[in-house]
Amino acid sequence: MCIKLYQYHISPENQQELMQIQRKAGEIYRKYIDVQTKILKSKTDETKWTEISFFKSEDDYLNKMPLINSDPGILELYRRFESLLISEIREEDYEEWLLS
């Protein structure tokens, strides 16, 4: 499993627009790839958000991202998302480890 984590800051007045963007982006992603995304809002910092996306495999992620990035709607959604940011986006990669 391939796991991507993104952290960023959005002003509280923009959280409804963030959710609209995330819903539409999720629809586009799911047209091309099997992905499950959790979106978390910090309880201690009202501007801090974390996204955790779970993909079947790193190969699947790497092979499908060019298709997603070429979708006409995704670029506009990303531009809207960038306009909401009040920080840089922090991105991290993880892999799943199962307890035996």
Image (cartoon, rainbow, N blue to C red):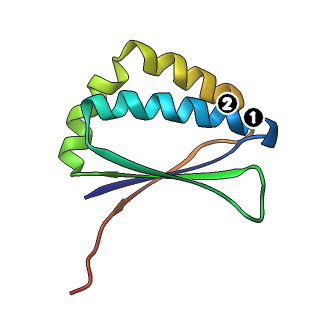
> Contact (CB < 8 A) between labels 2 and 1?
yes
Residue 71's quadrant in the figure?
A: top left
| Residue sitting at x 73%, y 64% | 43
| Residue sitting at x 26%, y 84% | 99
11 displayed left or right of 98 = right
Is residue 32 positioned above or below 2 on the image? above
Residue 89 position, x and y percent, is 59, 43
Residue 94's quadrant in the figure?
A: bottom left
| Residue indicated by mark 2 | 17
Given the current orientation, which residue lies at the most extreme bottom position? Answer: 100
Disc 2 residue crowd, few under 14, some 14–19, many 20+, Cα 10 Å: few
State the mark number for residue 14.
1
> In the image shown, does 6 or 30 lie closer to the viewer?
30
| Separation (CA) of disc 2 from disc 1 | 5 Å
User: Please, what secondary structure does the residue beneath circle 2 have?
Assistant: helix
Query: Which amino acid, by three-letter code, is at mark 2?
Result: Glu
Q: Image quadrant for the C terminus?
A: bottom left
User: Please, what secondary structure does the residue beneath circle 1 have?
Assistant: helix
Is residue 4 positioned above or below 98 on the image? above
Disc 1 residue crowd, few under 14, some 14–19, many 20+, Cα 10 Å: few
94 displayed left or right of 16 = left
| Residue sitting at x 77%, y 65% | 44
